Structure formats: C-alpha cells, structure tokens
Amino acid sequence: MRFLIIQQKMVGDVLASTILCEHLKIHFPDCEVHYVINESTLAVVEENPFIDKIILFKNEYRESKLAFFKFLKSLKREKYNATIDVYCKLESNLISYYSNADIKISYKKWYSKFIYTHLFSYTNNPNTTLGHAIENRLILLAPLIRELKQPNLAPKIYLSTPEKEKAKELLANHQIDTSKPLIMVGLLGSQPSKTYPPAYLAKTLDFISEQYQVTFLLNYLPHQSESLAEFLGHCSPKTRNNIKEEVFCPSLRSFIALLDQCDAYIGNEGGSTNMAKAIGIPNFSIFSPWISKTAWLTFNQNQKNQAVHLADFAPEILEMPKKERKANAEVLYQQFKPELFLEQLESFIQSEVVSDQ
C-alpha cells in the first residue's frame, strides 16, 4: 500500500503528524509513506525512518498557478491507496483530490466534504493526556487501523551522530562548561501575541540564577537582535553573565542538535517546545493567553513536559472568545507575572534539571 499524508503548516504541526507515519509503518510494515510538508519545516522530519518520501510544498506553488498544477499532476502518477489530509485547507484539498486515492480522509469542513470518503470532527476531550493536537490526528487513522498497537507514541526527531558531534564541538569552541546544567531559553514566540514579555522572562531567569549554577543559551534569529538587546537589558548582572548569546546556530537542523545537548528548555511555547519533546529534553513552556493549552500541552502525564498558562491562575479569561484574547494578548500577558508560577518552575528544575548534578 502507498499512503499520502498532507501537513502543510508550521514546525509543531509537521512534527505532530509524523506519528501518523509511524503508526502506518507499524500496522503496514511493507507500505510506503509519503509526506507533504512546507519547505521551511524539513529539518524536523529529516532522517525519520518512517517516512519513505518527503514531498516539499514549495513557495513557487503559491506564487504560480502553473507550477501548482504541474505539482498536482505529478501526484496522480503515484497511485496512492489512501490520503490523509491533516491540513484541510484549499491547497491540501486539491492535493487530496488529485491524488486519486480510493480512500481520502480529513476533517469535516463544509467547503470540501465532497472530496473525501471519510470525515471526522475535532475531539474536545477535557481529560486528554496526549493533548488535542495528538488525539485529533489519531482519529484520522480510524478508517485504516481498527486499534492502534502503540496508542501513546510520541513524535520524534532523529539526529545523526555527526550532527550531534558538531553540536558538541560548537559548545567546546565557545568554552561552555558542560558540567553545569545547560538550559535553552525560548526567547521569542513566532509572533508578538505569542511572546512572553521580555522583562518577565528576564525576571524568570533571574530567579533561576539566584539559586542554581546554570548556563543559558538563547533561541533567536539574527533579525531579532533588537528584541535580544531589550531582553538582555532587563536581566540582572548575574543572569547576564550566565547567558551565552554568542552560541548561535545557522540552521534549524543545527539548532535541534544543539538543543539535544541541553538539559532543559524553558521559555515561550511553540515549535521549540515540540522539538524539545521530540528529542527527550525536559521542557517548561509558557503559553500565550490565546493559545489552547489543552491542545498543545501534549503527553502531560510525563513530568518532563510541563507548561503554564494564564488560565491556570485566572480561569475566567477562557470566557473570552479566542479572537478577543488574541487581540488583547499584550494586556493579558501583563497579568501573567512570573511570581504566579515560580514555585512550579523551581519544582521542575529540581526534579528534571539539577537532580543528577
């Protein structure tokens, strides 16, 4: 059998959907799994042994209708048995349609229901431990797999030995003392409405520096230098001395390898959180007030994966519609002071970061 999985979106989404590839390989060992993703997310699926072919959705397909049509025609030749459309937007609707698969699976949307043979509604299980982001993907396997052999599979990122060695060399070249806990800090979210206030994040790191001997690395991009400078200006001298912002990775893949050398990830919830989970690094994430913690706090039965949300301390904010919370993210963030979660953070550090030191 030959399966096509479509997941065009951001890093966290692409990573989460890799579990579909693994489940298909477990239940159909001789099958082929092809995976459609955006070019920018390639780093999280490279070396994945459960994906036979990575199909990159290029920017030119959005810019040129002719290029997109040629891409769609190329899929017809693959003769897929089943297509799973996790993205469920116009582009992926057309990909599903042109795949000519006998089985086409996706979510219920009024504008595309005629394309698919099996449609599902999003789950809203309040007692989820896997997280809605995972559960909503697993339901798409129902037409193909009656019962999952390993229902608790988590997404994984696969690094090669040379990649890991290069990350170790990078730390050595910058004379980083690896005898002290190494913490990767998620400095910025993917957009301002997903970014914890720099002054609050600095205060969070100050709290850690006052109690533990640690080294902080920062996850940021060159064009974010102004935000970096603002953040550093809020840090205490002691914290500033523990931050090694000069340790920088030029690519997402090299960043993942560096993250693999760290003892923990602390900071804004987002793609880096999911990457940390996928390589087994303990993580403590700070959610944006408008993002669903129930959806993206995946595998929360594991103490290595912890997160905080303003709604944990002010549940009444969830009475506001999501769009309103997003529009007022800056105001809501001001209520989300570090003091609210420092006790939980300290417990996390003691149990997951410094316990073996």
Image (spheres, grey):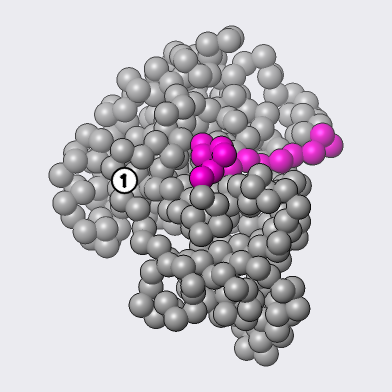
Q: Nearer the viewer, residue 291 or 84?
A: 84
Q: Nearer the viewer, residue 337 or 347?
A: 347
Q: Nearer the viewer, residue 166 or 25?
A: 25
Q: Is residue 332 left or right of residue 267?
A: left
Look at mark 1 in the image and give the residue it sits on.
125
Give the structural element (helix, strand or loop) at label 1: loop
Locate residue 48, reporting x and y percent.
72, 47
- Asked whether residue 265 is in view, the answer is yes
Q: Is residue 109 left or right of residue 61?
A: left
Locate residue 158, reporting x and y percent.
71, 41
Q: Residue at x 38, y 73 (%)?
A: 109
Crowd band around label 1 with a 10 angstrom C-alpha radius: few (<14), some (14–19), many (20+): few
Q: Residue at x 56, y 37 (%)?
A: 150
- Asked whether residue 225 is in view, the answer is no
Inspect the image, locate mark 1, and give the three-letter code of the amino acid beneath it: Asn
Magenta extent? 147-163
Query: Which quadrant of the structure image shows residue 122?
Result: bottom left
The outermost residue toward the bottom is 66
Q: Indicate whether residue 291 is drawn in magenta.
A: no
Query: Which quadrant of the structure image shows residue 263?
Result: top right
Locate residue 215, reporting x and y percent.
59, 23
Image quarter in which the C terminus is found: top right
The outermost residue toward the right is 162
Q: Is residue 249 left or right of residue 162?
A: left
